[in-house]
Amino acid sequence: MTNRLETLAPGLVAKIRDASLDKQRAAARAAAHLAVETSGLVDPSVEQALAALRDGKWGDTPERRAIGLLTDRLDARYFELQEHASEHPEVEGQYLKHFSQARASSAVGFALDSDALNAALESIYETHAAVGDLQSVVSVVERALQRS
């Protein structure tokens, strides 16, 4: 089954598929941290979700549900600002910031998925959307795969 990341980085997907569950979790965690740091996303629910990720609390947790709500709010704000950008060009930077932060929040949420492979693949895909630099994402993920 093809996933979204495979369209961008098929070699990386192969490495992730071949990795142990622990390494897949490490890749998801590294990607989520990169997305949060790069986007400048600061929110208590992000800190709690990253702590849950560090502590191995995956699946349907309060932290993951809170991240889902944050992602929804950021996406709604992004879409609202994007609509106004055609009439108000000064809004463009704001909506791109919200897009990046929504994708970072989504990366954290996916990293908390109960399935380690899906957590890694989807978190990394969302991180690429948040960061916009595939090579940086691949580098961080490959380092995480090697360290674990």
Image (cartoon, rainbow, N blue to C red):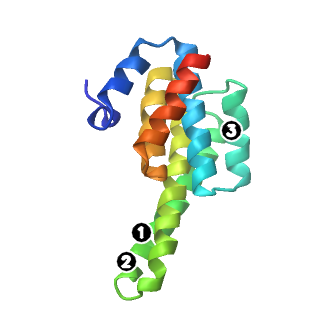
Question: Residue 55: image x %, image y %?
Answer: 73, 26
Do we see residue 112 in this rendering?
Answer: no
Residue at disc 1, secondary structure: helix
Residue under label 2 = 83
Question: Residue 139: image x %, image y %?
Answer: 49, 33
The amino acid pointed to by label 1 is: Phe
Q: Quadrant of residue 122?
A: top left
Residue under label 3 = 50
Horizontal side of residue 62 vs 28, given as left or right: right
Name the image quarter holding the N terminus: top left
Write the residue at 43% across / 27% down: 118
The amino acid pointed to by label 3 is: Leu
- Residue extending farthest to the bottom is 87
Question: Does 39 appear above or below 146?
Answer: below
Write the residue at 54% across / 37% down: 31
The amino acid pointed to by label 2 is: Glu
Question: Does 120 appear above or below 107?
Answer: above
Q: Are marks 1 and 2 in contact (CB under 8 Å)?
A: yes
Q: Quadrant of residue 144?
A: top right
Crowding near pointer 1: few (<14 within 10 Å), some, many (20+)? some
Q: Marks 3 and 1, Cα distance to the nearest angstrom? A: 26 Å
Q: Marks 3 and 2, Cα distance to the nearest angstrom? A: 32 Å
| Disc on res. 79 | 1
Question: Does 86 appear above or below 111?
Answer: below
Of the pair 128 and 103, the residue shown nearer to us: 128
Name the image quarter holding the C terminus: top right
Residue at disc 3, secondary structure: helix
Crowding near pointer 3: few (<14 within 10 Å), some, many (20+)? many
